[in-house]
Image (tube, helix red, strand yellow):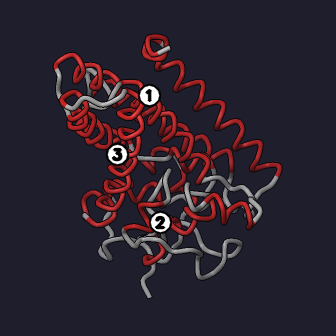
Amino acid sequence: MTEFILAHEAGIRLTFFCAVLAIMIGWEFAAPRRRLSASLAVRWSSNLGLVIVGALLVRLAFPVVAVGTAAIAAERGWGLFNWVAAPSWLAIVLSVVALDLAIYAQHVVFHKVPPLWRLHRMHHSDVDIDATTGVRFHPFEIALSMAIKMAMILILGAPAVAVVIFEVLLNATAMFNHGNVKLPQAVDRVLRRVIVTPDFHRVHHSVYRDETDSNYGFNLSIWDRLFRTYRPQPRDGHQTMTIGLDIFRDPRQRHLDKLLIQPFVEDRRRDAVTSE
């Protein structure tokens, strides 16, 4: 099974990506949480276009990516789980959890360091939030995130299977927790004890800075609780809260060419969220 996963890693990831995206879009049409305000055609073409541009940049920038890095670490005996004898299942579980924590930490840093916020704020400039927002990242941020992820894989000596599992989970949970989908409150209450739900993460896309600087998790919800960055609900309610950033509300800013230059747009307020 391990050999099959590694041999077909790209196909597995693409299959899960397409399947989860299709499921989330169907769910959003069947049971939307909020009324969307912008053109779906423009938003979706731009958001999914960023996925393609980002993937091409990563392939050009790195001779190997995450799974290849794990294979090299195993071959050369680099990293924690290549030094410490541990059952393979335990190494896989701990690697996935550790990588999830690393993504949480990276997310916090990208909000706190101004040059990194310049890259990341394009993710927040979407005036609506749905499954495609979960894959809307600037190509430069995607490349930098890949470099950070590769460094973590080398430090951990994460098994290649763990990396494949993590990559699939990261994409799937990002699309899920950005989804414009309605969950029963009782279900949301139970799920958010373990994973990040759409209502949990939507707070993070609020126009208010104190709400934007909260609920950083993508997969496991424990990190926000543990590090006290958790905010249960948006102050304006999920139906009426304002999504996005004030500086990028012009409809022209929703086109792919404008999204690509957003990191170079000056904003003297450090970011465009409203602070109270």
Provide the secondary structure element on which disc 3 rests.
Answer: helix
Provide the secondary structure element on which disc 1 rests.
Answer: helix
Residue 101 lies, in percent from the top left, at 36, 52
Label 2 neighbour load within 10 Å: few <14, some 14-19, many 20+: many
Q: Which residue is mark 3?
A: 98
**Which of labels 3 and 2 is toward the front?**
3
Q: In the image, which disc is placed on residue 36?
A: none
N-terminal of the pair, mark 3 or mark 2, is 3
Cα distance between the residues tagged 2 and 1 = 25 Å
Image quadrant in which the C terminus is located: bottom left
Cα distance between the residues tagged 3 and 1 = 14 Å
Cα distance between the residues tagged 3 and 2 = 18 Å
Look at 38% across and 55% down and name the residue there.
104
N-terminal of the pair, mark 2 or mark 1, is 1
- Dot 3 amino acid type: Ala
- Dot 1 amino acid type: Val
Label 1 neighbour load within 10 Å: few <14, some 14-19, many 20+: many
Task: Please indicate whether residue 18 sits to the left or right of residue 223 in the image.
Answer: right
**Is 92 in front, or is 254?**
92
Look at 30% across and 39% down and name the residue there.
149
Look at 63% across and 81% down and name the residue there.
236
Task: Please indicate whether residue 243 sits to the left or right of residue 189 in the image.
Answer: left
Q: Which residue is mark 2?
A: 215
Q: Residue furthest bottom?
A: 276
- Dot 2 amino acid type: Asn
Residue 103 lies, in percent from the top left, at 36, 49
Residue 20 lies, in percent from the top left, at 64, 36
